[in-house]
Image (spheres, helix red, strand yellow):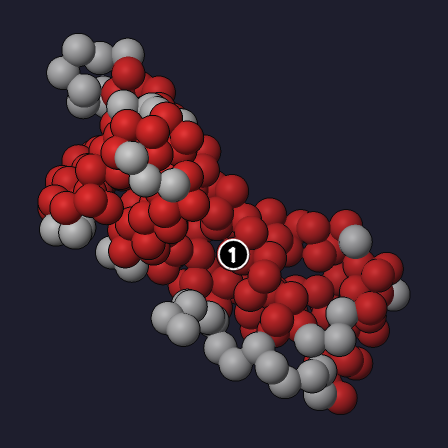
Amino acid sequence: SNRIQMYNDKSPLNSSERELLGRIAGGDQKAFTELFENYQAMVYDYSMKLTRSKTQAEEIVQNIFIKIWINRKGILDIENFGAYLNRATRNHSYSALRKIAAQAVREMELTEEGIPGGVNTEHRVLYNESARILKSVVDKLPPQRKLVYELCHEQGLKYEEVAEKLNISAGTVHKHMKLALKTIRKHFTGLELWLLVLLFLKK
């Protein structure tokens, strides 16, 4: 798997980590500061890899550690703090990506040129590049798979309608779509993938 991780998240809490979390659960602000200093850089770096945005990564770090402090009484229920932080960072990052992508698509729809005026230039370029790569990947699909994809996503036909049009079963259409999307997903990660998801929803 090419899943990004901050560090090995399979190890259970060691005694010093558990002691630190125990102090935090009791309301020790110095312990919380120590926890923040130990882990904030890793959360930030992981968020940056996923969102490619310094602003988003900084907000994610703040949000995660604020939630940890607010919910500190239950912190000792966490058996694996590394896995917990990885999961929290992924969830916050993907939520941020969905919002960024939705904003980019929304603003593109409001302009005749298809160029979002208020969207971060980096994200605008990424959107255009994603659309270009998508077209390139689709063009290289096997002929019938490409046709099925275009009929479903570009013309908005239902699987049953495509099956009738091409004189194949709905199951075959479903299989072609599943394989087409699997091929497409291999070429995209992070924000690019969320932009594509929203492009699919538009069609």
Tell me if mark 1 has few (under 14), some (14-19) or many (20+) residues whose alpha carbon lies within 10 angstroms of its own: some
The location of residue 144, given as percent across then percent down, is 20, 44
Q: In this rendering, is residue 112 above or below 179?
A: above
Q: Please give the residue where the numbered disc 1 appears in the rendered image.
A: 90
Q: Is residue 153 left or right of residue 128?
A: right
The location of residue 19, given as percent across then percent down, is 79, 81
Asked if residue 118 shows in the view, the reply is no
Quarter holding the N terminus is: bottom left
Out of 145 and 14, give the one closest to the viewer.
Answer: 145
**Which residue is drawn at the image coordinates 12% and 51% (left, top)?**
140
**Which residue is drawn at the image coordinates 69% and 50% (left, top)?**
67
Q: Residue furthest bottom?
A: 15
The location of residue 179, given as percent across then percent down, is 33, 54
Asked if residue 83 shows in the view, the reply is yes
Out of 118 and 145, give the one closest to the viewer.
Answer: 145
**Which residue is drawn at the image coordinates 15% and 40% (left, top)?**
135
Question: Under tag 1, what secondary structure?
Answer: helix
Out of 180 and 70, give the one closest to the viewer.
Answer: 180
Q: Name the quadrant containing residue 14.
A: bottom right
**Which residue is drawn at the image coordinates 32% and 40% (left, top)?**
168
Q: Residue furthest front?
A: 167
The location of residue 76, given as percent across then percent down, is 82, 70
